[in-house]
Amino acid sequence: MDNQLKDIFFQLLRIGLWGQGSLSLVRPLTADDWTEIRKYAINHTVEGIIYDSFAFLGENELPPQSFRLKWAVRVDQIERHNAKMNRVIAEQFTAFTQQGIRPILQKGQGVASYYRIPEHRISGDIDWCFEADGYKKARNFLKENHPNFEDTAGFSLHYYWKDIHIEHHKKTFDFRSPLKKTYLNKLLLDYQDHQRTVIINDVSIRLLAPELQLLQVNIHILKHLITYGISLRQFCDSARLYYSLSSQIDCQILQQIYHNTSMLKWTHLLHKLLVDYIGLPEKALPFPIPRNTQVDWMLEEIWYSGNFGFNDERFKNGKKSKFFHRPDSGKRLWHNFKRYVKYAPQEAIAFPIMQAYSKFLGKDFD
């Protein structure tokens, strides 16, 4: 995609995400242009957000009717999937609670509630973390009621419940460095009384406190940037959270949390990208962006890697290995290590160590 069409893509993304603005075109968009825009929207899992921009476009700016029909069918599928996920979330939260387990909904539908049109945010799966010894209790519950789960690397387990992919996580946050464990556990205890809830299918579902929800979403982005990349949808998540929670967070404390977890330097990059490309108003940020912060290099990498790097065209003919799912994995991991080690050194260095540990020693076996 050339730079002019990429600029139009981001215009459409911002219009759909924020529900305002107009499209600036040098020339009318062709059917080929819309094909390319749709391709990248799918790769970045933001086709629902791009679709939401259509309501703000003039008749001569809209895609051809055949495209709109395809897009409308896809958005209907997204809505149906999200409705099904919401039913499962409510059902599982109720079942866990009845067992004395205290689950917390991570990312996904909890973040979607902060969108203008929540049902148009694509959600891949349902992620649960747990208070106290809830992970162990939930695992024992599954053994008795849903035994076909699988323990996985990354201190997690996964399974399908009514055709919806579910993941349970021992760790609330995606930090790799073990040096932060004590501090993160203290944060969870300190903010336990500040948790929020979201109503899903008439059930009050527990979410993290605003500061910790931001920390959770943003470290998840960093985790995937250090490995194979991540889609623009997750940056939209971060932007919508900042926009919606800015009046509810203690900005000074949040900055200190980022500092204490050694991700402040990278967070400045994130904030710059959210303002310049995703359209987050700068006043919604918790603290100023340092002058001369440059993020074009990071956006370029995000743009091509797409959703977890699965469809990165730069490596489609790369060498494959039985140890990795993606081609040229070693080269990609090394390049991302070099990109991010100066912004988040503990996380970049700890990644290969903790990945190996969680794969071979961090699983539950019984």
Image (spheres, rainbow, N blue to C red):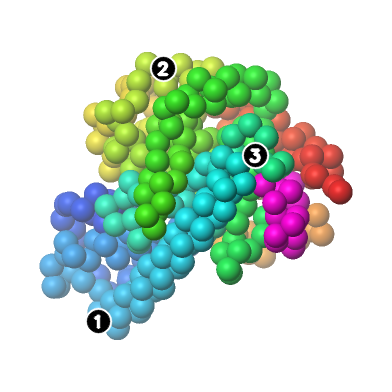
Q: Inspect the image, locate mark 3, and give the three-letter code of the amino acid beneath it.
A: Gly
Q: Mark 3 or mark 2, which is nearer to you?
A: 3
User: Residue 253 got which mark?
Assistant: 2
> Which range is magenta?
138-154
Q: Is residue 4 visible?
A: no
Residue at the (45%, 25%) spot, across then down: 193
| Residue 263 x, y percent position in the rendering | 52, 25
Q: Inspect the image, locate mark 1, and give the three-letter code of the amino acid beneath it.
A: Gln
Name the element at disc 1.
helix
Residue at the (24%, 61%) spot, across then down: 53
Q: Mark 1 or mark 2, which is nearer to you?
A: 2
The residue to which callout 3 is attached is: 134
Nearest to N terminus: mark 1 or mark 2 = 1
Q: Inspect the image, locate mark 2, and give the three-letter code of the amino acid beneath it.
A: Ile
Q: Along the line of sight, which residue is nearer the eye, 82 or 318?
A: 82
Q: Are marks 1 and 2 in contact (CB under 8 Å)?
A: no
272, above or below 117, in the image: above
Rendering quarter of residue 92? bottom right
The residue to which callout 1 is attached is: 65
